[in-house]
């Protein structure tokens, strides 16, 4: 994604009460209603809730997962109760693990299931449907209104740990998965200077990310 590209935020936006989308609704929000492989063939209902969704002028699609402190990244298992749903999730994760060249000894079920299922949805869009999709993990550092504020260095360490636990090293999806660690005081200062709010504007230049 080049710095000159214009990003159009599809969620969360003020005109939509800052709603978060999941399942087919997140695809509809991005204008991806008719895919070659339907999402329901890959993942059961009640999938990931996306913190933000966007597309660019050149039809690149951005999925955003945001965290304010490290403990939020820990997710021990799927909440799916239906056996068929659990089996569908497991099949999707196995296919994604292989695509990401993950270590066979790594577990994608626990304790970083949420991170893993976000990678799975990137695989679903890029590999199964040929969509130019990107996954962004947005980590807020030095947030004062959370139980356990984290520094930039702590977030960097957590990212290394997560990738190690998932058995990730060099893989073909590396160019499409990015992490941004943003210090909240700097973010607030930037927003104040721009007289704006996070995601209040529906468009952004990629150079600002």
Image: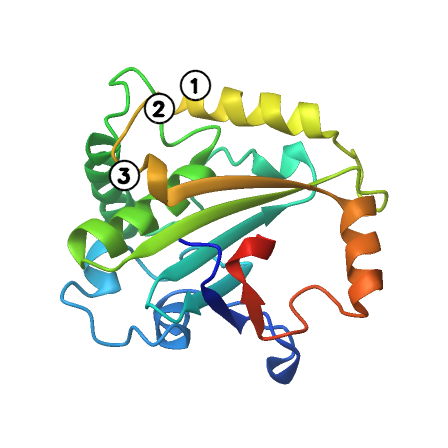
The quarter of the displayed image where residue 90 is located? top left
Q: Is residue 65 above or below residue 12?
A: above
Pointer 1 or 3: first along the chain: 3
Outermost residue toward the top? Answer: 105
- Circles 3 and 2 in contact, beta carbons < 8 Å: no
Q: Is residue 13 above or below residue 51?
A: below
Q: Is residue 83 above or below residue 47?
A: above
| Front: mark 3 or 2 | 2
Asked whether residue 142 is in view, the answer is yes
| Front: mark 1 or 3 | 1
How many numbered circles are shown?
A: 3
Tell me which residue sits at (64%, 67%) in the image.
199
Q: In the rendered image, which residue does mark 2 sit on?
A: 168
Tell me which residue sits at (42%, 49%) in the image.
135
Tell me which residue sits at (50%, 54%) in the image.
64
Q: Marks 3 and 2, Cα distance to the nearest angstrom?
A: 14 Å
Label 1: which secondary element:
helix
Q: In the rendered image, which residue does mark 3 sit on?
A: 93
Outermost residue toward the left? Answer: 36
Pointer 3 or 2: first along the chain: 3
Asked whether residue 83 is in view, the answer is no
Q: In the rendered image, which residue does mark 1 sit on?
A: 164
Image location (x, y in percent) of residue 10: 50, 73
Label 3: which secondary element:
helix
- Circles 1 and 2 in contact, beta carbons < 8 Å: yes
* Residue 50 relative to residue 201: left or right: left
Tell me which residue sits at (34%, 76%) in the image.
31
Image location (x, y in percent) of residue 116: 39, 38
Label 2: which secondary element:
loop
């Amino acid at each position: 994604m080049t710095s000159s590209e214009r990003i159009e935020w599809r969620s969360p936006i003020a005109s939509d009460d800052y709603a978060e989308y999941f399942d087919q609704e997140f695809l509809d929000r991005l204008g991806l209603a008719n895919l070659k492989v339907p999402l329901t063939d890959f993942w059961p209902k009640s999938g990931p809730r996306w913190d933000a969704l966007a597309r660019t002028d050149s039809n690149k699609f951005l999925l955003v997962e945001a965290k304010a402190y490290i403990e939020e990244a820990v997710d021990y298992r799927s909440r799916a109760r239906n056996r068929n749903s659990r089996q569908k999730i497991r099949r999707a994760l196995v296919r994604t693990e292989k695509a990401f060249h993950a270590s066979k000894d790594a577990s994608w079920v626990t304790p970083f299931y949420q991170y893993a299922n976000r990678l799975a949805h990137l695989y679903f869009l890029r590999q199964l449907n040929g969509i130019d999709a990107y996954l962004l993990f947005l980590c807020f550092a030095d947030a004062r209104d959370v139980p356990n504020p984290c520094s930039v260095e702590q977030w960097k360490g957590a990212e290394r740990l997560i990738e190690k636990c998932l058995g990730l090293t060099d893989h073909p999806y590396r160019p499409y998965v990015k992490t941004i660690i943003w210090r909240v005081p700097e973010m607030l200062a930037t927003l104040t200077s721009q007289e704006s709010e996070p995601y209040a504007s529906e468009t952004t230049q990629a150079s600002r990310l």
